[in-house]
Amino acid sequence: MAFHIVLVEPEIPANTGNISRTCAATGAHLHLVRPLGFDTDDKTLKRAGLDYWHSVKIHYYDSFDEVMAAYEGHRFFFASTKASKRYSDFAFQDGDFFVFGKETKGLPEELLRQHPDTLIRLPMSDTVRSLNLSNSAAIILYEGLRQTGFVGLE
């Protein structure tokens, strides 16, 4: 099994490229929900992912509902600055999904209302609205990996 990163309508190719590299380094699966704010042959996307694209387990969907249907019974955690619980308040398990929204707006309000018990946030000062998407994904993914003993990683 492996952890999963889901990006719902990502807008900035460099962020998705950085996240893809993190997924390649950790064995996590990357799930991209359209519409994407870039072409998948974008130079910035490819450059950020370097030459690791062949190692990324990447999946594409036309809606988040498709992701939920394909992985029914799995646990999904939704990253949001509006969450009341910190990501470190949860005990993650191998196979969990970490869901992130677009850089400019985050996850849709409807999605947040549908999953109030699994909303997670990163603690931060009130001087910024949010952390960079690729940093947020890496922090939460590595917490999941830490909690599960970094299985298969050196």
Image (cartoon, grey):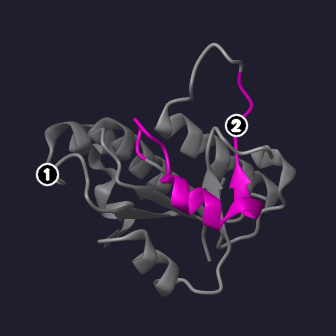
Which tag, 1 or 2, sits closer to the chain's start?
1
Query: Which one is closest to the eye, mark 1 or mark 2?
Result: 2
Question: Helix, strand or loop at disc 1?
Answer: loop
Three-letter amino acid code at the position of disc 2: Leu
Q: How many marks?
A: 2
Q: Tell me the kind of residue under disc 1.
A: Asp
Q: Is residue 43 left or right of residue 21?
A: left
* Residue at the spot of label 1: 41
73 with respect to 6 (left or right): right
Q: Position of residue 137 (x, y in %)?
A: 55, 45
* Residue under the point 34% across and 44% down: 17
Q: Residue at x 41, y 45 (%)?
A: 102
Q: Which residues are magenta?
A: 102-124
Q: Secondary structure at mark 2?
A: loop
**Label 1 with label 2: CB-CB less than 8 Å:** no
Give the crowd class for mark 2: few <14, some 14-19, many >=20 residues within 10 Å: some
113 lies above or below 41: below
**Quadrant in which the N terminus is drawn:** bottom right
From this view, report whether residue 95 is shown above or below residue 22. Answer: below
Residue 23 coordinates in the image, percent (x, y): 48, 55
Horizontal side of 103 relative to 44 (left or right) equals right
Reading the image, the residue beneath label 2 is: 122
Q: Judge whether 142 appears above or below 68 on screen.
A: above
